[in-house]
Image (tube, grey):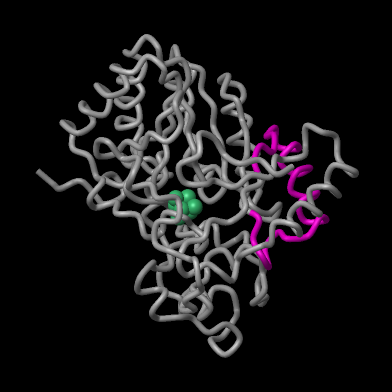
Amino acid sequence: MQAPSLSIIQSDVPAWQQMLSDLVTDPQELLALLGLDASQLPASAQAAGQFPLKVPRWFVSRIEQGNPHDPVLRQLWPLIDEETQAAGYVIDPLEESRFNPVPGLLHKYTSRVLLTAAPHCAVHCRYCFRRHFDYAGNAPSREDWRAAFDYIAADSRIGEVLLSGGDPLALSNRQLSWLLEQAEAIPHVTTVRIHTRMTIVLPQRIDAELSARLAASRLRVVLVSHCNHAQELSAESKASFKILAANSVTLLNQSVILTGVNDTSSVLIELSEALFGQGVLPYYLHLPDAVAGTAHFDVALDAAQGLVTTLQQRLPGYLVPRLVREEPGEKSKTRYA
Ligand code: SF4
């Protein structure tokens, strides 16, 4: 019998999974795709070695050609600045290792737990507070997952399960469905919250099978996208949000305020309005966490508060995100505006 052709084999793989495996990981290739050269934007080999460049090829289209200061590119490019050792910037600024009672589960706030559902992401964001996270040591087996869900089942105060990562939507529909089933089987769990950047960097991920599974869940489903600049939004993200909303998923967004990306009121206003135009409400504006290698992104608290004051003057209240910082050991995020 003749072996099936490659095109037939590939057609069994969902389009989004093929796109997820088509990543730009070589800084030289990204420069070439953007019409830039290394003299305009030198890369840090050390930073790229520790936390490699990773961008879905599709998402490169959201970066402006020939602009080394593009705000989307700045979130992805391993700058020399990452080599700076700034005082107070550490590997685990949120001390998450203190709140990790079983592999794959973080329990920081009483009523909710976070599962590090996926050990990888579609993209590497240079400001990521989990860029040094020990995913290898936190890649739960089925046994570990059972222990995690036993932990949730034993604590009736836990009403919400957060799927985070890595990026939980980097998992297959089958894997996600299994995790949902485990949460659905615990009577006191009422809500599942999915934190993802996939709706932004690879919105094709929201396929019919996933949407139908979320719609069929007995849990309330909240999806929090992570978008930092209006330029990241696309016709494709709008289509994905429309499908999710039609399947009763609550759509929120959280951003991180980042120097050189979105640290002006005009950019933040444009972001809030663009998100609303795609059916998504701005929820949190995070001050950056003090993670090693990211000091160049920092925005001072008083400057961020000033920006939010301008947003309050220019936008309806429902489009003004809450300015927050996460502090290790606190029972909730600290709110500043
Ligand atoms: S997608 Fe999220 S977890 Fe992954 S690198 Fe970006 S910020 Fe970090």
Q: Nearer the viewer, residue 41 or 17?
A: 41
Q: Write the residue at 41% across / 17% down.
A: 157
Magenta run includes residue 269: yes
Query: In the shown orientation, is residue 321 left or right of residue 194?
Result: right
Q: Write the residue at 77% across / 56% down.
A: 267
Is residue 246 in view?
Answer: yes
Residue situated furthest right in the rendering: 313
Q: Write the residue at 57% across / 40% down.
A: 225
How many marks can you see? 0
The x and y percentages for residue 150 are: 24, 21
**Is 244 above or below relative to 224?**
above
Is residue 19 in view?
Answer: no
Q: Write the residue at 58% across / 56% down.
A: 288
The x and y percentages for residue 99 are: 35, 40
Residue situated furthest front in the rendering: 329
The x and y percentages for residue 190 are: 46, 15
Q: Quadrant of the N terminus?
A: top left
Q: Nearer the viewer, residue 17 or 98?
A: 98
Span colored in magenta = 257-284
**Is 21 above or below relative to 26?**
above
Query: In the shown orientation, is residue 47 left or right of residue 309?
Result: left
Q: Quadrant of the C terminus?
A: top right
The x and y percentages for residue 13 are: 33, 42
